[in-house]
Image (cartoon, helix red, strand yellow):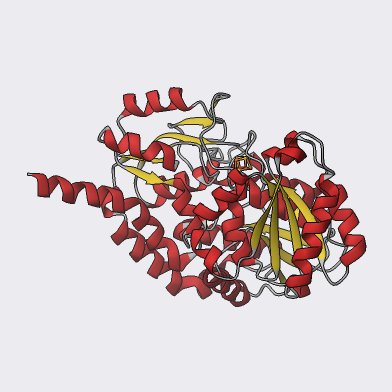
Amino acid sequence: MNTAAPISTGCTQTPLLRERGQHEVFCGLTSIIWLHRMMPDSFFLVVGSRTCAHLLQSAAGVMIFAEPRFGTAILEETDLAGMADAQQEIDREVDRLLSRRADIRRLFLVGSCPSEVIKLDLAKAAERLNARYAPKIRVLNFTGSGIETTFTQGEDSCLAAMVAAMPNSDAAQLVVAGGLPDVVQDQMLDLLSKIGVSNVRLLPNRSSDQEFGIGPNTQVAFVQPFLGETHDILVRRGAQPIRAPFPLGEQGTTAWLHAVAVRFGISADHVDAVTHSARLRAQKAIAQASEPLRGKRVFLMPDSQLEVPLARFLSRECGMELVEVGTPYLHRDLVGQDLAEIQNGPTLSEGQDVEKQLDRVRAAQPDLTVCGLGLANPLEAEGLATKWAIELVFSPIHFYEQAGDLAGLFARPLRRRSLLGVAAE
Ligand code: SF4
């Protein structure tokens, strides 16, 4: 007879509500706004329309006045009507760009809705341009099209394209997949070094000089949950994914480090010893910042694909009650460990059907709704507190030192609302 205690499965067996309606999210081009900072020797050339150029310029307006790391090759009406040879025009644009910008080492040709509609083959363009410019400059392509995608998928497509171009390697190494702000990346590398993990590679890496290969001795730890395509191509290339909750909050970070340590034969006691003070700091910071969140009800609309790990953090570490956890795509290989840590109870939904989801928000009247920019204003006007999901992608939120700030990001709208309430009385 098996007397072992049943393993908690959390939300892993919860029936999934599949929504296949209207999407209201930014497109994958949005990812360029943070990717260009993480790869300073790269240039992102969007092959798109004036709409695409406007999106980038208004979303990242400040950068346009600095040294830009992205631009748009505009498809004119003649291109869209198939009257011009767009491939020749891409070559001309790239030649012009690279002759002016000797600092570019990696050039990404980024597809868009218009380039997909006219079936412009950017893989062919990248291959042709590579023949001309490699090895000095590497040309890759990915899509940021908004057709049936969400904005974090731009990073996923970009990293998947980078993995596809990597050589094979038998080196024993840890690859950390997912973009992070520099300061957070440094903290992570320090933690990994303290627990005794060496030969750490970063995807994306800051410089093309740091390029590496992939193979069966590559262990991969993910720090962003929206990398489904990157995960799948890494696995196809023989890499070994490390299953762990995402390093958000104190518990998430500790569990992530433990999972990495197990893969490298490092004891849990050693991890606990070297992280002791950082864990205490994070616990204290979360306890303080999450005070307004305790016992409050939260509804996460599908937007950034960070929803499942955030739901784990908000329920397990901040004491919130989850009403619904929606995500554009549920990649169980990536978020399964977070799902297992969420107590069964909330509705779990995948995909979007905005009107139906808004009806459920209105019926539930949560204390806080995490949603896209376009939905936040109408909900606020109806008296509901909201948090913009996109802010979580742009803010440093990972690992111990950011744990209190992460709780604070959710607490701020509730605090503001209670202050306004007091002022109005
Ligand atoms: S890629 Fe598509 S959704 Fe994105 S800005 Fe261009 S046209 Fe709009």
Image quarter for residue 107? bottom right
Q: Position of residue 310 (x, y in %)?
A: 47, 48
Query: Is there any visible trace of residue 245 in the rendered image?
Result: no
Is 188 situated above or below 80?
A: below
Which quarter of the image is occupied by the C terminus? top left
Q: Position of residue 208 (x, y in %)?
A: 76, 71
Q: 97 or 175, which lies in front?
A: 97
* Number of numbered tags placed on the structure image: 0
Q: Residue at x 65, y 35 (%)?
A: 147
User: Please, which residue is most extreme toward the right here?
Assistant: 131
Query: Is there any visible trace of residue 69 in the rendered image?
Result: yes
Q: Residue at x 40, y 48 (%)?
A: 314
Is 343 situated above or below 137?
A: above
User: Please, which residue is most extreme toward the left here?
Assistant: 425
Q: Residue at x 45, y 36 (%)?
A: 301
Image quarter for residue 108? bottom right
Which quarter of the image is occupied by the N terminus? top right
Answer with the quadrant where ligand 1 appears in the image.
Answer: top right
Side (left or right) of 44 relative to 421: right
Q: Position of residue 132 (x, y in %)?
A: 91, 64
Q: 168 or 142, which lies in front?
A: 142
Is 96 situated above or below 194?
A: above
Q: Position of residue 219 (x, y in %)?
A: 74, 60
Q: Residue at x 65, y 52 (%)?
A: 155
